[in-house]
Image (tube, grey):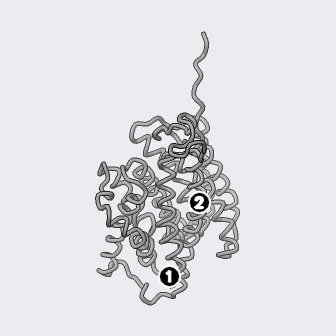
């Protein structure tokens, strides 16, 4: 866990014997199911970071990527959402608003814009890597206990890793890279808000995707139709459309959305942030052959610090043993 304990306890399967409805057969524990979902999500998010960086060299514009990101899941899930419109009604408006504002257009456009100004390593490190720190800040703001011990050390390492990434661009000042890093930090903060809201909203994974994608697609559609956000999807290359349709629409929008919602309900918002401990490494390794990026010294120092920090920040503290008199 990062800093606080907000997850609802899930009784282990052994407490009730074999899985209900399957006498004599044991399945994966809820924790194992959640971790498996996170591992798959890691690979999809790595693809998101790479595609966000690659967008600057494609024939698509940010609005086009957003339309694919939020439109494809709505098309695929339309039959299920149409049959149960009440499934889009959250129990509480607060968490629903956090989820929509955090996981909607802002985080996508922020990741794309930040990637265009920096590198895939920056996107893959800062956006998911800073989530535990932002989640911890949100929880402290809500009255939960501040991080201590290894958790506090982990959050400090995350901050140190981000500083290591951007330090070489401070003197002399590289305004583009610093602006890109700042944009990625905003995107990470939004994603943390989405993580917390998704944990608290009273919807299943399909309903959560519908609640996120419907208003987000409507907003980006209105901005595109009114000319506020330019779009060039009608004249884009078919290969670019296919790539972003698969990665952003089916991958990030549908599969990662379902798996991340599932993992949060199994593991909780803070422990699910452990996905950031693997994503930066995967992005750095994949960016070398796919995008031709060469890891700089700042990346080689900053990414391990962020990765180690996320691992430590998500460690569950041992329960205190009362001293004997």
- Element under label 2? helix
- Quadrant the C terminus occupies: top right
Q: Which mark is residue 258?
A: none
Q: Where 44 sits versus 36, above or below?
A: below
282 lies left or right of 31? right
Tell me where residue 174 sits by quadrant.
Answer: bottom right
- Residue 239 appears in the figure: yes
Mark 1 — residue?
241
Q: Position of residue 189 (x, y in %)?
A: 46, 55
Q: Position of residue 304 (x, y in %)?
A: 67, 54
Q: Which mark is residue 40?
A: 2
Q: Position of residue 235 (x, y in %)?
A: 44, 90
How many badges with numbers are in the image?
2
From the viewer's perspective, is the residue at label 1 or at label 2 nearer? 2
Q: Earlier in the sequence, mark 1 or mark 2?
A: 2
Tell me where residue 223 sits by quadrant.
Answer: bottom left
């Amino acid at each position: 866990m990062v800093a606080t304990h907000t997850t609802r306890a899930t009784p282990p399967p052994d407490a009730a014997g074999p899985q209900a409805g399957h006498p004599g057969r044991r399945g994966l524990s809820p924790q194992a199911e959640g971790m498996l979902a996170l591992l798959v999500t890691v690979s999809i998010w790595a693809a998101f970071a790479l595609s966000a960086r690659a967008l600057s060299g494609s024939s698509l514009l940010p609005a086009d990527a957003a339309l694919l990101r939020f439109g494809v899941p709505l098309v695929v899930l339309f039959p299920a959402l149409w049959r149960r419109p009440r499934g889009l009604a959250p129990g509480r408006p607060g968490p629903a608003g956090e989820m929509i504002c955090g996981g909607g257009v802002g985080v996508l456009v922020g990741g794309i814009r930040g990637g265009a100004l920096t590198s895939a390593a920056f996107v893959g490190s800062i956006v998911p890597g800073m989530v535990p720190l932002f989640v911890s800040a949100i929880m402290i703001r809500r009255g939960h206990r501040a991080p201590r011990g290894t958790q506090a050390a982990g959050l400090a390492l995350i901050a140190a890793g981000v500083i290591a990434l951007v330090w070489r661009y401070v003197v002399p000042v590289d305004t583009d890279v610093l602006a890109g890093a700042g944009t990625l930090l905003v995107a990470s903060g939004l994603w943390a808000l989405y993580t917390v809201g998704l944990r608290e909203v009273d919807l299943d994974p399909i309903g959560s995707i519908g609640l996120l994608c419907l208003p987000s697609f409507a907003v980006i559609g209105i901005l595109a139709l009114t000319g506020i956000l330019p779009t060039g999807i009608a004249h884009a290359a078919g290969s670019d459309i296919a790539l972003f349709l698969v990665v952003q629409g089916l991958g990030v929008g549908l599969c990662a959305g379902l798996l991340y919602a599932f993992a949060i309900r199994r593991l909780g918002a803070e422990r699910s942030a452990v996905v950031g401990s693997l994503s930066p490494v995967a992005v750095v390794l994949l960016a070398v052959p796919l995008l031709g990026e060469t890891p700089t010294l700042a990346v080689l120092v900053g990414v391990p610090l962020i990765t180690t920090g996320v691992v430590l920040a998500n460690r569950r503290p041992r329960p205190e043993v009362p001293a004997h008199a």
